[in-house]
Amino acid sequence: MKPDSPQNRFTAYRFAILLAVFLLQLLTTPLFEGSMTAGYAADIFFYLILAAAAFSIRKSRFFKLAIVLGTISIACEIIGYLSGGIIIILILTDCVASTYLILVTLLIATNVARKRNIDLDTVMGGLCVYILIGIFWTSIFINLELFHPGSFNFGVHGQHPNILSIYSLLMYYSFVTLMTIGFGDVVPISSIAQTLTILEGLIGQFYLIFFMASLVGLYIQKRQNKDSL
């Protein structure tokens, strides 16, 4: 295979592609807010995230396991639609998706941590892990609210939002917590919800301070060494 072949170039920017899919979902989903189209759009982008994440770890020995879990997750999603949104099926879907996400997150984090040649795509891989942590915690929060309604108070968003709104609000809440912004419009009520919120905030801060700071530092050092030659 030629070094400059399209496949090699595609591989060289695998984490950039994954990050682009994340950002595309973030920017386009609000355009369909309040309609059923939002749910379908979110699912389509979620499938793209599954595919992009699987592509980024295709050289791992756990790649086949990731594909199986991703396929099961999609199958559960389809069954959920056909069943009319039965709670137990939604919980099962989120559990499978959570397992897939934690597997992919750990594999990407391991891949990034082991790389000796730190380039821009490696830094983007670190950012992908950060975003995946937020998505993983979203699925945990959603399962908690579905299994134990009232675990969160949605305040100004209404006391009894529909399923679609719950998914959207808890994703927003997860990333607000991960970045320790804390607007206070969504509040954890149950002890489990509060504990999980604290854990996500701690993980997010430790990840940025110890992992991303080191990664960016190594990248800057490499660029400076390259410029000094």
Image (cartoon, rainbow, N blue to C red):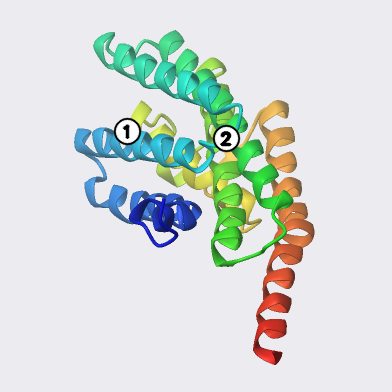
| Between 137 and 76, the one nearer to me in the picture | 76
Which residue occupies the foreground of this view, 60 or 48?
Answer: 60
Residue 10 has which mark? none
- The C terminus sits in image quarter: bottom right
Vertical order, 153 against 120 (above or below): above
- Please report the residue visible at 45 percent of the width from the left and 51 percent of the height from the top: 11
Residue 225 occupies quadrant: bottom right
Residue 151, position in %: x, y? 59, 27
How far apart in space, not on screen, are marks 2 and 1 (Cα)?
A: 18 Å
Q: Is residue 145 visible?
A: no
Q: Residues within 10 Å of mark 1 (few under 14, many from 20)?
A: some
Which residue is labeled 2 in the image? 104
Q: Quadrant of residue 48?
A: top left
The amino acid type found where label 2 is placed reads Val
Which residue corresponds to mark 1? 43
Give how far across and how far down residue 201 sits, in percent.
70, 48
> Measuring 33% from the left and 40% from the top, which residue is drawn there?
45
Above or below residue 165? Residue 208 is: below
Amino acid marked by disc 1: Asp
Q: Secondary structure at mark 2?
A: helix
Q: Secondary structure at mark 1?
A: helix
Percent of width and height locating residue 26: 38, 52
- Which of marks 1 and 2 precedes in the sequence? 1
* Tally of numbered tags: 2
Which residue lies at the image location 59% right of the left edge and 36% below the top edge?
137
